[in-house]
Image: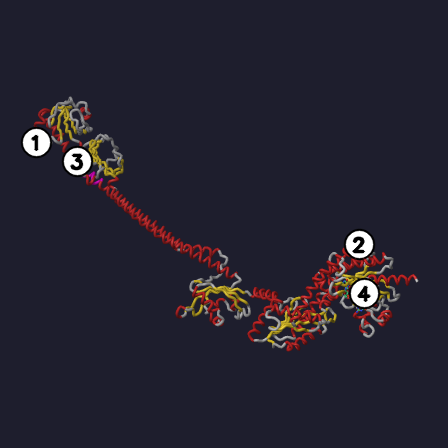
Amino acid sequence: MLSLPSPPRRKAPGSRLARWLGRGLDTHISLPLFAVLLVIGLWILTLRVIDADRAAATAAVHAATLERIETYEAQMSRSLNGIDQTLKVLKYAVELNGTAGALPALREQGLLPPGLVFVVAIADRDGRVVASNPEARAHDVSGTAYFLYHRDNNLGLPFVGATVGDSIKSEPHLHFTRRINDRAGRFAGIAIVEADPSYFTSAYERSRDGEQGMLGLAGLDGLMRALRVGDSVSWGQRIELGHTDGGVALHKGPDGVLRYTSVQRLHGFPLAIVVGLARDEQFAPFNEKRQTFLAAASGASALLLLVVAVVSGWAWQLARVRRRARRAQETYAAASEGSLDAFFVLRVVPGPGGTVADFAVEATNSRAEGIIGLPRAEMQGMLLCDMLPHYRTNGIFDDIALVALDGKPREGEWQASSREARGRWLHRQVVAVEDGVVVIVRDITERKQVEERIFHMAHHDELTGLPNRNLMHNRIEGAIRNAARQGSAVALAFVDLDGFKLVNDGLGHKAGDELLRVVSKRMGACLRRNDTLARFGGDEFVILLPDQSHDPQALAPLLEKIRIAVTEEIEVAGQAVQVSCSMGVVMYPRDGMDASALLMNADAAMYRAKDLGSNNFQFYAREMNASVEEKLVLLDGLRNAVQATFEGADNNGFRLLYQPKVDLRTGRLFGVEALIRWQHPEHGMVPPQRFIGLAEESGLIVEIGDWVVREACRQARAWMDAGLPPVTMSVNVSARQFEESRLVDRVAAALRDSRLAPELLELEVTESLIMRDLQKSVAKMRELKAMGVSLSIDDFGTGYSSLSSLKTFPISRLKIDKSFVSELADNPDDQAIAMAVISLGHKLNLRVIAEGVETEQQRAFLRENECDEMQGYLFSKPVTASAIEDMLEAYALELEM
Ligand SMILES: Nc1nc2c(ncn2[C@@H]2O[C@H](COP(=O)(O)O[C@H]3[C@@H](O)[C@H](n4cnc5c(=O)[nH]c(N)nc54)O[C@@H]3COP(=O)(O)O)[C@@H](O)[C@H]2O)c(=O)[nH]1
């Protein structure tokens, strides 16, 4: 079972020693040490036993050598005494019977030694052998060492000659001699006993002396008289006698063999006996035994070392595995402590029939404390379901138990309900280990929150927090499925704000945003909990009303409530503004079977509501989609008109009408406003309100506007070239056209190509157009002004330009919108506005012109209040260029008169 040991700490020197000693106690180290000691002990014992054996063997060989020398000495003493006795008898017999009679006398008395063993001879004073037994031919020994010794020495001692083979007797033999004196004590000859050298080594016993035992008789002159080694008898070798006191010493023999040797001098003869027991032979049993001991000790050592090597190897492997496991555990513990995850090592508590009854907590890390809310020590040993009883019911216990049963890892996410982590999102990974499982738990709340945020962002509108198009689409589909099941209906309202653009352009995006937020809250407040309000972008909203009856009229009260809520005044950017809404309403299944169809038809119905003057709601009718088609047809026609205009076609293309502008004080016609018309091949003259919006939407306005500027400049110059008095030419510039980067260049080109003085061209821009991007607009206006072109603000009073920014506009004229002029006679509010605009314009050194002047009362009011100029049907509707020409000619004539 996996367990989590305490995290490793920095090791103190003491603990390092303890660890080292502890390691010494490891079987794989202690066992070989013990085995080595055992082997050393075994060898010490073995060598001691061998030493003892060697000492015993040495003592034994010493004893054997001594015993041998003693025995040999006794034998030799006897033999030599016998030989000496024979010599003495011979001498006596010679002295008694003379050289010739000595041997017969002795033979007769049976005193001669057996002839097979000894040759007994007598030599006279001249060295001639005069008698011998067995008989031998006479020969001369006067030149021999023994003869010469006796002739020259009268010491009464026997002499032993060297072992030789001579002309008389080729077999080796040696001579024991004694001097014979005559009665006068003079040298009379010598008695000789000749012996075979092997006679002196016959005491050799193979069983005791071995194959290389040595037994020999040596003269005190260092020459061997007889030497037996094994079966071979030899003589004549020179040996170092050393001590001749019968002690034992290790010597190398004449044959190079090491022997325990003892030398013992023989009494009465110049001889010594030599006994040697070959070391190798004598030590053979010991050596054999020693070999046996060594072999046994070696075998035992080898066996022991082999067993120990095997056991130690196994123990080492085991220790290595343990060490690795311990290191892994330490690493695991350190990692688990440093980990962001909580670990729970759980041991299975078995139930009946191989089931899992519960889990006992074996180990945890400190992260686990934070999740469970219990100290580690307290968790240790606790049953999982005692610690977290709700795991039995929320499926987590079953999930963990399954891992323990089938060994397959599993993971899952859940929202915690334990004390410490309540409400937090957790992720668990469960892996099987021996006897249980490890559960790794990670807090994924932040990730979940991010996911939720991303999900929310993907499905909600950032500005209002309302569901967006995606989410709404899903909800519509869900509502349709429910309605299909229940047989109910679903209503969908497409809502577009009226006048929003004005607020947004006039007061800025912030104000527009605020307005959208307020309106969305108001609409939301009208709805039930299961209704959905979504923002599709801009000022477009969609309302989903599930669980409806199939009668559309039943929706009318709610729609009206929403409409009224929207139209209530709103204060944004410090100003009270008012917008309304146009709503297109569809019903499932009546107006469409899916979300896309319903939304498309609701959009068409909304456009119908707009067409009908806005601020109302319209239920979808099949024919409404025709207007979309109309729009496409119109756009196609517009493109053709642009083409036809440039080609100069008669029956198609744009035309300009001109509406005079008159000085209110003098009545002089000082300028005209160019107003576009579309000469349609089928519908005749189409007014600008029908196509300018679409031209803006499609971008065609840039090309169309450019044509208007060029044509207006050309016409103004043409009038001048025709000798008419110069008039100011005013041209309307739309927002899209004004924002176009090449506007200034295009205007400059139009002036250059027409040769019109820039001072005679005036561009009319609206307040809302300027406020879209105040800085850029002012910069562009300044460029135009620098060229000499004048600028005037059209429809002044309907927008929301701040008075502080107004003074920065490089303009020369303000135009009071005709909506304030139309009721100027009766409406005090409009009067106040008109007067305020006139006063403001003058304070800013601007000319003020009123448009839409249709009545004398209006003109009178304007004159009274010092408005500078006027434009309107009272003086003239927009007319053709030739009509203006007529007016200018008449005016010129008037002046001349
Ligand atoms: N971007 C461009 N916009 C243009 C261009 N030509 C016209 N327009 C804009 O279209 C709007 C409608 O214009 P139009 O139908 O030509 O109406 C103008 C006048 O006919 C009308 N007017 C003038 N005097 C009176 C009056 O006494 N009573 C009355 N009911 N209507 C009158 O007002 C329109 C001129 O308005 P304004 O431009 O604000 O001076 C209109 O908004 C044009 O701007 C074009 O070439 N480009």
- Bounds of the magenta span? 65-75
- As helix, strand or loop, the secondary structure at mark 3 comes to loop
- As helix, strand or loop, the secondary structure at mark 4 comes to loop
Q: Earlier in the sequence, mark 2 or mark 4?
A: 2
- Label 1, on which residue? 110
Q: Earlier in the sequence, mark 3 or mark 2?
A: 3
Q: Earlier in the sequence, mark 1 or mark 2?
A: 1
* Colour style of the rendered protein structure: secondary structure
- Label 2, on which residue? 753
Q: Residues within 10 Å of mark 2 (few under 14, many from 20)?
A: few
Q: Nearer the viewer, mark 4 or mark 1?
A: 4
Q: Residues within 10 Å of mark 4 (few under 14, many from 20)?
A: many
In space, the residues marked 3 and 1 are separated at their CA atoms by 25 Å
Pick the front one: 648 or 616? 648
Pick the front one: 851 or 415? 851
Q: Disc 2, disc 4: CB below 8 Å?
A: no
In space, the residues marked 4 and 1 are separated at their CA atoms by 202 Å
- Residue 190's quadrant in the figure? top left
Q: Disc 3, disc 1: CB below 8 Å?
A: no
Q: Is residue 279 left or right of residue 728?
A: left
In space, the residues marked 2 and 4 are separated at their CA atoms by 25 Å
Percent x, y of residue 20: 44, 54
* The residue at label 4 has a CB less than 8 Å from ligand 1: yes
Q: Amino acid at mark 4?
A: Pro
